[in-house]
Image: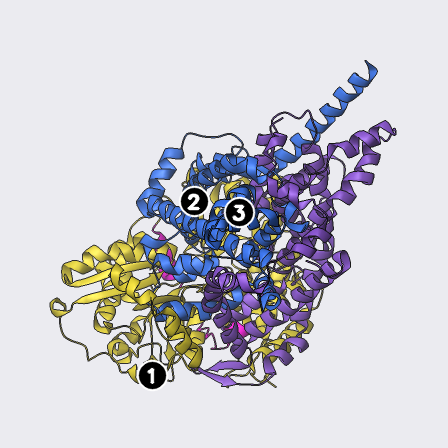
Chain colours: A blue, B purple, C yellow
Amino acid sequence: MGKGLRQDAGMLLVYVLLGIGALISIYPFYWMFTASTLTEGDIFKTSSAWLPGGNFLENLRGLESSMPVWRALLNSLIVSGVTTISTVFLSALAGYAFAKFSFKGREILFFLVLMTMMIPAQVTLVPLFIIMMKLEWINTYYALILPNMVTGFGVFLMRQQMMGFPDELIESARMDGSSEFGTFLRIVLPTMKPACAALGIVTFMNQWGNFLWPLVAVNDKEMLTLPLMLSMMVAPGNVVKYGEVMAGSVIGLVPIIILFLFFRKYFVSGAFSGSVKG
Amino acid sequence: MIQPASEQPAADKAAQQPRVHLQRKHGFSGKRAGVTPYLFVLPFFLLFLAFILYPLIYSFVLSFSKWKSGNMDFVGLDNYIHLFTDPLFGKSLLNTGMILLVQVPVMLILATCIAALLNSERLKFRGLLQVAFFLPAIIDLVTYSLVFSMFFNESSGMVNQLLQWLGLEPVAWRTDGFWAKILIICALTWRWTGYNSVIILSGLQMIPKELYEAASIDGAGSVRSFFAITVPQLKPVLLFCMILSTIGTLQIFTEPYVLTSGGPNNETLSAIQYLYQAAFKTFNFGLASAGAYIIMTIIAILSYIQLRLSKGGEI
Amino acid sequence: MRRAAWVRRGFIFFTILSLLAGCSSPTSENQGNTATPQSAGGSGAGLSGEIKVAAWNDAADALEAEIPGFNQKYPNVKVTIQRVTNNYEQIIPPLTAGMGAPDIIQTQNRDFQSFLQKFPDQFVDLTDKLQSHKDEFAKTAWAGVEKDGKAYAVPWDLGPAGVWYRKDYFEQAGIDPKTLTTWDKFIEAGKQLQSKLGGKVKMTTLDHTATGDMDIWLMLMNQLGGSFVNASGEIDFTQVANLKAMEMTKRFKDEGITVNTPTWDERIRAVVNGETATVIFPVWYAGTIRHQAKDQQGKWGVMPLPAFTEGGPNQANLGGSILAVTTQSKNQEAAWAFIEYSLLTNEGEDVQMKYGLFPSWTPYYQSENFKKNDEFFGFPLAEFFGEVSTNIPELKFPPEFMDLSKPIQDANGAVLSGKAGVEEAFKQAEEQASKASGLKIAP
């Protein structure tokens, strides 16, 4: 009896603590949503910026009239989607090779993989731009997608995961005459769902918010990604239409929340923890 | 339970097998492997060559040159010498280091606590709570800067009003260097704690329940078993988070750029921000490249040390 | 087109190999290309081609709105506006690489000399086209586009400064704006206003650590005719005008008449919530007041800057942009035609005015539209700023300004936060600026 009470009190404390933490985490998003529904004058008013207003559609219409917001959303989806799929697949492929084969140069190659995680994006900006210019890829999806098709982080994560995969299963697949790629595709990859989901979410998230490279890689209005479009609407010294920007932010938030809810169960099922156990 | 135990994939179970076993059997030797592993890593390295290595070499060349009248002139070590003698670059490194030293431990401790709470057995709404804690990682820059400037406004901000209501002095978040650093730390922690706690949670769920049951029979309270079981079991995950956070914080740019512009008096100027200014404010790409190489070297050394300390060199 | 791209894919790594081999001077291919566009005169119908214009925010909106009018005159020129941020992140790589730049770019007036120095050969010499217009531009705007007697850009808008003030607050405090002829009086009035209105309202706004901007100091030093370098191009931060302006800025803070506004948003917040009675800012702040403080319609007035001494100089400029044609452009004539139509005709400027861009091209000041009453503010806004831009001291931003601005802004911050005295801080800034730019310090 007493113990049950104490446990209930304990749970209450857990809820209170988590509740406070969650509130702090989501408040800015609440503010974003609220601001997107207010008129321009009300957003900055300390007295009225607490409750949603009825101006969302108007802000959205304003945004639609000045910027190709749906096109930007589509661009963001295409770029993030393709880079995510390719990053997951190519990282798994390379990670598998690093984990399950011994070959000449493996150590040095893997060191190169790790090195790529340490490079600040600002460093490669101008040379990358020059490459894209020479290939005439500025303002194309190629420029947005190709440099991000695989990441060192992805290969690292996948390699750590693959190291735990039982060798016996691979051997027996080989006995059955499966090709190496076939083994990877049919035997190994399906067991890596959680790791793939985790890497997928992180990649998608990073790409969704990626900013600096798209800024340089595209300048055509039709090729803008969502965060890029929003950043262009904010320039100190100019009139900034905050309500419209916030409406755009709200739109940009939806796909990523859906994605996270969808893959969440994989994401927390041990995908990352395996990565350092190898 | 939202997280059925049966979902645990084979790979994860295998991951817990003793590592010696893995080391021994790890890898299939020569003949059968042939070109296969090379083919498998080929896509990565083709992309690596084109979009990482080439730009890196290019900027390495840039780091020894200076743009003048549209030409690249070789200037030897000038850029590096300039950086090592520029107190501002030193200051930016120092700022970055100070933020790192406080922020990463604070964040990881907080994240571990949150993960432990989220791992409570009878917790309801776990999914929703996870989403809530994860969200800050995807905040867009405009909202980020607006909300934080609103919260930490010195005269009318909510944080200071709360402090005053508690009978404390309002804090000079923007005009005092020390507090501006705290502001940056708060913002960084706000943005990444939930993300890390989700990762740590995934580690928590892999700790065998029997360990806790045994401890409970021995009469250990939840606090004691947290320190006796949870923390040691979590070490690998925490290390993973620590390395990633260290790399991330050493490359910190967004927060000082968006929230404090590096001020007051350059007290929150970060190293990457210094480079950004060199490149885009004064067009000095040579200097920016040189600085980037310095920072990359620091990151590489720190990551190496962290790995060494924790695992005897085995990544 | 897509297929061509796919075919090219096969050759990527080939290309990259060749890139690796020859990554020397990327601008070389444009070096022979600095010729000015063929001489003026040819009326427009014959022009054809496509031009791209890179501009940001309001300015981009304004240019976009010029296109229909422009196309009536030049039906065969297709104009596309590229949206960019105002940090030049999209402009610098193509200029550095020597390829991929749009036909026309916008820069801030104060930065253009730096562009000219760092990217010579990238901008078309427009001297012949502009010769006859030179005297029509506000002097201080023109100073930014000229190098060695040649003009490489067209001054766009101007930012004559004034004091925006809340009429209702001034009335409540019993202050007559007409009497605020000196900054001393302004400060006194500020204290009076703050005590009458009781705590919640400050007289004006200031970035207390000069982290986000040093705009107040810039306006005050410009008002006094200060500059960053002396006549022979040596760094001269410690000239009297600069120091006096800094002392006054510091006084604003020390006398307690300012609310701290370290960012653009926070100034808006102060305005919208009525926490400040004035904003010392140029004409272009009208748009923000109009837009973000809609329900304060009719409550805002504007007066000339107070002077340092009775009857002293009281005009200053802050901000303003330019438009330049790049030598990478294949349609330089069409690019010029677009700029000419937008900035050197009354129809063009009518559009600019709609977007709050106050012209630096003075013939427009005679037009009907310029003298029009402004509905939101309730007085002829443009006309007022026309009157306070008759004699703005010319402030030449040296090509090294980008190297100088960080040290001087840091000095502003050091003074304001009491870390250093004015002279000491500015002396130190001179040394840092000299190190960064390679310029000598004035004796």
Residue B72 horizontal/vertical position (percent): 47, 82
Q: Which residue is denoted by mark 1 in the rendering?
A: C31
Classify mark 2: helix, strand or loop: helix
Residue A188 marker: 3
What range of the chain is rendered magenta?
Answer: C380-404
Residue A60 marker: none
Depth-wise, is mark 2 or mark 1 nearer the camera?
Answer: 1
Q: Residue at x 48, y 41 (%)?
A: A256
Residue B231 lies in magenta, yes or no?
A: no
A139 versus A45 height, above or below: below
Residue B39 horizontal/vertical position (percent): 47, 62
C18 versus B238 height, above or below: below
Chain letter of disc 3 in the image: A
**Are the residues flagged by discs 1 and 3 in contact, CB closer than 8 Å?**
no
Q: Quadrant of the N terminus of chain B?
A: top right
Left or right of B105 on screen, residue B60: left
Chain letter of disc 1 in the image: C
Q: Which residue is denoted by mark 2 in the rendering?
A: A245
Dot 3 amino acid type? Val
Q: Quadrant of the C terminus of chain B?
A: bottom right
Mark 2: give few (<14), some (14-19) or many (20+) Cα within 10 Å: many
Residue A275 horizontal/vertical position (percent): 63, 49
**Are the residues flagged by discs 2 and 1 in contact, CB closer than 8 Å?**
no
